Amino acid sequence: MLNVMAFMKKHEDAILKLLPLLAFAVPLLWLYFLDAASFEAMWKGRTFQLFFIWLIALELILDWEKIKPNPVAKPVSARALALAVALLLPTMYLVISNYLGLNVAIAAASEQSGVFFSSYMPLAIEYLVFAVLFCLTVFLAFGKKGLTGFSVPAFFLGMVGAIYAIDNIYPYGTFAPFQLFVPTTATLAANVLSLMGYNTVYTVQTLAGSGTMPYLTATDPSNPARTATFAIAWPCAGIESFLIFTVVALLFLKRIPMSLKAKVGYFAFGALVTYFINVLRIVNIFVIGMDNGVNSEAVKLFHSYYGPLYAIAWIAMYPLLILGTQSLISRFRKPRPAQPNPA
């Protein structure tokens, strides 16, 4: 026991830095054992929470020396007690929501309120609650500077929860602000399919309860039986990944010491790649639909997991790409030592 206490005292600073990560890693591991399938879905699943953990780890790796935990003077102080409770709250929420009926109550209340995807509201609330609890934990552990330092994972989780909630309440194409950007993406996807040799037909339809959505049909001219028709709503067009990229990129670039021109350039390049990935996601759905059928399991798997994974993997890796290019640029810009003048 004394050895454990001595070890904790010696490594108190490192342990305090890791506590917010552990506070959410434990309940997520528990949730995996409860519902492993939910971690196999990017859209309306928990795979985004794994990226949330990855973003926390990334912040710790990049700013390990800069992160300064608030010192705990006394183990029984009010601040120490508040931090201990905050660290337990994610696990407590898991127990209350999954074992004490909170998720059932949220779904029932959502259904009574006319929410279209009421069964998915507990997951959206879970994301939002975890985002709030993460901010609380970081504030108690690291103070106001901690909120700034860990703003990327916090906003990432909150943004995903908000997007899920919006789609639950306004399904398909009924949320006009997001659906406004879909026709351009769908048109570009149709152009790419045409370049690949497929015949495409683009129409726009407005249906009750579904809103206004582009309908795209792609057909293989050499085999007319290979055809696929899909309505394209904003989640299918990857608007959610573009919003997530915008939040993560702006928050990350804000912290990097570089010129405004360089930041604009990095953001514009990343946004362009993200947008093009979303176009390719639609193209892939049509190709898979022509090969396997529009209602096939292959289409559902790509729509729910692999399609969103393309963009999110890019978003998660882009900060590392920025840091790598900045490191290379700084090396090339290092002044060479002055050569001595010849005698």
Image (cartoon, rainbow, N blue to C red):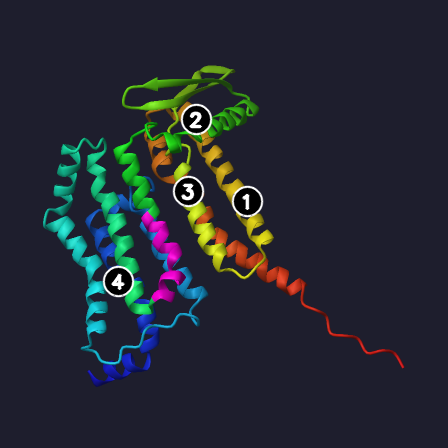
Label drawn at residue 23: 4
Read off the residue under disc 1.
Answer: 268
Q: Is residue 236 left or right of residue 135?
A: right
On the picture, is 91 further left or further right than 201? left
Of the 4 image quadrants, the one containing the N terminus is bottom left
User: Which amino acid does the dot numbered 3 rest on?
Assistant: Leu
Give the structural element (helix, strand or loop) at label 1. Answer: helix
Q: Which residue matches tag 3? A: 243
Residue drawn at point x = 27 percent, y = 84 percent: 6
Residue 53 in the image: above or below residue 1: above
Residue 227 located within the stretch drawn in magenta: no
Residue for point 17% across, 36% down:
110
Whether residue 186 is visible here, answered yes or no, is yes
> Given contact means CB atoms under 8 Å apart, are the residues at marks 4 and 1 in contact?
no
Q: Mark 4, mark 1: which one is toward the viewer? A: 1
Q: Secondary structure at mark 3?
A: helix
